[in-house]
Image (cartoon, helix red, strand yellow):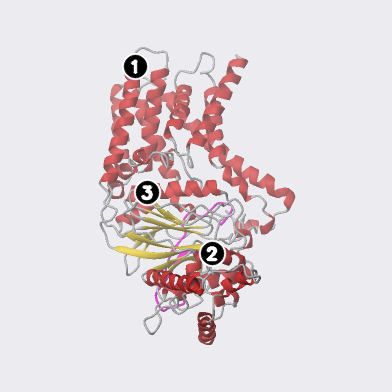
C-alpha cells in the first residue's frame, strides 16, 4: 500500500509539472490533456485502497501545487528585495514564501474541485460537463480578483491558435472547459471499462469540432475593416530597481521629449528630423555606446527582433535612434518655459553638424591615418544622400503618428510632460485622488502639459502595490510604489479619436473587463505594463494573454512595456510586430479601429452559464443518488 501511494504520488506530481509546462510559453494543449486525464482518474477510479479517505484530495492538491509552482516560477526573480529596504537575509525566504503560497492556494482550489467531482461521480458524462464548465467559469471569476494570473483558458497559446479561437465565441472559460472535456474522454478511453473505443472516437471528434469552431470564429473577424491609427510606442528599458533614481528619471524624460520633438510638426511645416538627416541616422551600435541607458541592456533579455507575421499589415518599426536627439540625450530636462532658448541652441548645434562631415565617420577614419582608408569621396556623398533619404522617410512616418504611448508607471506623481504635447500622449503614471494615490493610464491632449483623462488601475498586486490594513502595519509592501488604492472597474478610456480599452499590467488576465469595454465602444486594446525584474518567461506569458484578449474581443492590441513585450497584435491574435526585449527602443505601429463585436464581447459568459444550468437541470432529472 505504501509503495503504491508513493508511486501514485510521484505520478501525480509529474502530471502537475507537465500541466505547468504545457502553459505559455509553450502553449501546447496536447501536453496538458494527459495531465488532466490523470486528474479525472483521481476523481473517478483510483486503484483500490487509494480512492478512500483524504488521499485523492491530497493528491489533487499536489497536482495543483506542482502546476502552479512551474507556471509561476518567475516569482523567484523578485529576489533580491534590498532595493525596497528588505534585509538581504530575508529577501530569498520572502520570495520563496510568496511562490509557495501561490502554489498552496492553487493546490487547494484543485482539491476542492476534485472533491466535488467525486461527490457527483466523475464517470458520468453529465458530471464531466458540469465539472468542466465550473472550472472554466471559476477561472473567469478568479481573474476579476487579485490572486489570478493564468490558467487553462490561456493554455492554447501560442501553440494552438485555432483552439484559442473558441475564446471569440465564449471566452477563455470555454477554452478551459473544452480541454477538460477532451481530457475526460481520454481518461475514459484508457480506463479498463467496456466501450473504450467509443470514448476515444468521441474525444477525437471533440478535438476536431473545437478546432473547426475556433477556425470559423477567427475567420469571422475582419481585422482590417476599420479606420487606422498610427502610434509611436516607447520602450524605455529602465531597470525597476533603479527607476526612481534622479538620473534615470531625467533620462526617461529626455527620451520622451525627443520623441515629442520628432512627432510634432515644425512651424514652417517641416520636421525636426529633416533639419539634421545625418545626425538622426546614427548607427544604433554607436548610440548604445553613447547612451547611458542603452549601454546597459537588461540582463537575460537578448535582442531578438520579431519578424512581421502578416504580410498585409502596415506596421513600421522605428528603432530607438529614430527618436533620439543628441543634445537632448546629454542636457538636463528643462521646463517648457525654459525650453525655447535651449531649442535654439540645439538647432544651431544640429545645423553645425549638418554643415560638417559626420563626426562618427570622422572618428572612425581617424584610426586609419596611415593611408588604409582609400574610399572615394563620391561614396561618402552617396552615403550621406542615402542617410538623408532614410531620415526623410523616418520623419514622414513619425509625422503621421497620432499618439505617443509609454508604459506603466513612466511618469511620477504630478509629473507634467517635458514639452507641450504635439500629439496625444498616453502614458502610465501616478495621480492623486483626494487622499488616495493611484496608478493610472494618463491621457494628455495635444498642446497640454497636464493629463486631461485617465483610467485608474483596478486590480492591484497584493503585498506589492496594495497591502491590507497598511495603515496599521505601517508597511508599504514589496514594491517601490506601495500604498496605492484601486480605481473604478471600468477599463474604458474615452478619447476624441475613439475609445480604447485599457489593461494596466496584470489586469490583462481579466478578459471579461476588456470585453465589457469593447461592448461599450472601445475600438482597440491598450496594454501598459512594467514586467521588470521578471524574466522573459513572464513576458511570453503576457504575450499569450494579449493574444487571447485580442481574439476574445476581436480587437487589435498594442502593448507598451518598460522592458517588453512592446508589440502589436491583430484582431485574430497574430503577432504583427514586436520591439526587442530589454533594450531602449521605439516602434511606429499601425492598427485598425474595429466596431464589430465577437459573440463573447456581446454575450460574455452567458452561453456557458446557460449550458451549465441545462447540465445541472438534466442531472437533477436523472434522480440518481449521489455517491
First in residue order: circle 1 vs circle 2: 1
Region rendered in magenta: 440-465
Residue at 59% from the left image edge and 46% from the top image edge: 75
For residue 267: magenta?
no
Task: Name the spot of residue 477 as percent of width and height, x first.
Answer: 62, 55
Give how far apart the Cα atoms at labels 1 and 2 are.
Answer: 61 Å
Q: Is residue 610 left or right of residue 321?
A: left
> Which residue occupies the foreground of this view, 22 or 341?
341
Q: Give SS at disc 3.
A: loop
The quarter of the rendered structure image containing the N terminus is top right
Q: Give SS at disc 1.
A: helix
First in residue order: circle 1 vs circle 3: 1
Question: Dot 1: few (<14), some (14–19), or many (≥20) neighbours within 10 Å?
Answer: few
The quarter of the rendered structure image containing the C terminus is top left
Task: Name the spot of residue 243 as percent of width and height, x first.
Answer: 60, 63
Q: Does residue 227 appear in the picture of this structure?
A: yes
Q: Which mark is residue 272?
A: none
Question: Dot 2: few (<14), some (14–19), or many (≥20) neighbours within 10 Å?
Answer: some
Q: Nearer the viewer, mark 1 or mark 3?
A: 3
Residue on which disc 1 sits: 197
Residue on which disc 3 sits: 574
- Against 19, residue 468 (above or below) is below
Dominant SS in magenta: loop
> Which residue occupies the foreground of this view, 39 or 25?
25
Q: Nearer the viewer, mark 3 or mark 2?
A: 2
- Against 406, residue 569 (above or below) is above
Residue on which disc 2 sits: 284
First in residue order: circle 3 vs circle 2: 2
Amino acid at each position: 500500500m505504501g509503495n503504491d501511494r508513493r508511486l501514485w504520488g510521484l505520478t501525480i506530481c509529474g502530471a502537475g509539472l507537465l500541466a505547468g509546462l504545457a502553459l505559455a510559453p509553450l502553449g501546447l494543449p496536447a501536453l496538458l490533456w494527459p495531465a488532466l486525464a490523470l486528474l479525472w482518474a483521481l476523481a473517478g477510479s483510483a486503484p483500490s485502497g487509494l480512492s478512500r479517505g483524504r488521499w485523492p484530495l491530497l493528491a489533487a492538491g499536489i497536482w495543483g501545487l506542482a502546476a502552479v509552482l512551474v507556471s509561476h516560477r518567475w516569482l523567484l526573480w523578485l529576489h533580491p528585495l534590498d532595493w525596497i529596504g528588505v534585509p538581504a537575509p530575508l529577501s530569498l525566504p520572502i520570495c520563496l514564501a510568496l511562490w509557495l503560497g501561490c502554489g498552496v492556494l492553487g493546490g487547494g482550489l484543485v482539491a476542492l474541485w476534485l472533491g466535488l467531482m467525486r461527490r457527483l461521480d466523475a464517470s458520468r458524462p453529465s458530471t464531466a460537463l458540469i465539472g468542466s464548465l465550473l472550472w472554466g467559469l471559476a477561472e473567469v471569476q478568479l481573474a476579476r480578483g487579485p490572486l489570478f494570473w493564468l490558467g487553462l483558458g490561456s493554455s492554447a497559446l501560442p501553440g494552438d491558435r485555432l483552439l484559442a479561437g473558441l475564446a471569440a465565441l465564449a471566452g477563455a472559460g470555454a477554452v478551459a472547459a473544452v480541454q477538460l472535456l477532451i481530457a475526460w474522454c481520454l481518461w475514459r478511453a484508457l480506463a479498463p471499462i467496456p466501450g473504450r473505443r467509443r470514448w476515444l472516437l468521441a474525444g477525437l471528434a471533440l478535438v476536431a469540432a473545437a478546432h473547426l469552431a475556433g477556425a470559423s470564429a477567427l475567420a469571422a473577424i475582419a481585422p482590417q475593416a476599420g479606420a487606422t491609427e498610427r502610434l509611436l510606442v516607447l520602450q524605455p528599458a529602465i531597470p525597476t530597481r533603479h527607476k526612481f533614481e534622479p538620473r534615470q528619471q531625467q533620462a526617461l524624460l529626455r527620451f520622451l521629449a525627443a520623441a515629442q520633438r520628432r512627432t510634432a510638426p515644425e512651424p514652417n511645416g517641416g520636421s525636426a528630423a529633416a533639419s539634421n538627416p545625418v545626425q538622426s541616422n546614427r548607427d544604433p551600435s554607436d548610440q548604445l555606446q553613447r547612451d547611458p541607458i542603452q549601454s546597459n541592456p537588461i540582463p537575460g533579455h537578448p535582442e531578438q527582433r520579431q519578424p512581421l507575421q502578416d504580410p498585409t499589415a502596415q506596421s513600421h518599426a522605428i528603432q530607438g535612434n529614430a527618436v533620439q536627439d543628441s543634445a537632448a540625450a546629454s542636457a538636463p530636462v528643462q521646463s517648457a518655459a525654459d525650453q525655447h532658448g535651449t531649442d535654439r541652441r540645439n538647432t544651431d548645434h544640429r545645423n553645425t553638424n549638418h554643415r560638417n562631415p559626420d563626426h562618427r565617420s570622422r572618428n572612425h577614419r581617424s584610426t586609419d591615418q596611415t593611408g588604409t582608408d582609400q574610399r572615394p569621396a563620391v561614396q561618402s556623398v552617396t552615403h550621406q544622400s542615402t542617410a538623408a533619404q532614410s531620415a526623410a522617410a523616418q520623419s514622414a512616418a513619425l509625422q503621421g503618428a497620432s499618439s505617443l504611448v509609454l508604459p506603466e508607471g513612466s511618469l511620477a506623481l504630478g509629473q507634467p510632460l517635458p514639452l507641450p504635447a504635439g500629439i496625444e500622449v498616453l502614458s502610465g503614471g501616478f495621480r492623486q485622488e483626494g487622499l488616495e494615490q493611484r496608478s493610472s493610464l494618463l491621457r494628455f491632449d495635444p498642446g497640454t502639459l497636464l493629463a486631461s483623462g485617465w483610467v485608474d488601475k483596478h486590480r492591484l498586486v497584493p503585498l506589492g502595490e496594495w497591502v491590507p490594513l497598511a495603515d496599521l502595519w505601517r508597511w508599504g509592501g514589496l514594491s517601490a510604489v506601495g500604498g496605492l488604492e484601486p480605481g473604478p472597474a471600468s477599463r474604458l478610456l474615452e478619447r476624441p479619436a475613439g475609445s480604447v480599452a485599457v489593461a494596466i499590467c496584470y489586469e490583462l488576465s481579466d478578459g471579461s473587463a476588456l470585453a465589457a469595454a469593447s461592448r461599450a465602444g472601445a475600438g482597440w486594446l491598450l496594454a501598459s505594463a512594467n514586467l521588470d525584474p521578471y524574466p522573459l518567461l513572464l513576458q511570453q506569458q503576457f504575450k499569450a494573454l494579449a493574444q487571447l484578449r485580442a481574439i476574445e474581443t476581436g480587437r487589435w492590441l498594442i502593448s507598451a512595456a518598460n522592458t517588453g513585450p512592446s508589440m502589436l497584435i491583430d484582431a485574430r491574435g497574430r503577432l504583427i510586430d514586436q520591439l526587442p526585449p530589454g533594450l531602449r527602443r521605439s516602434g511606429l505601429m499601425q492598427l485598425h479601429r474595429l466596431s464589430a463585436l465577437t459573440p463573447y464581447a456581446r454575450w460574455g459568459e452567458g452561453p456557458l452559464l446557460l449550458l451549465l444550468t441545462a447540465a445541472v437541470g438534466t442531472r437533477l432529472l436523472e434522480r440518481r443518488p449521489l455517491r
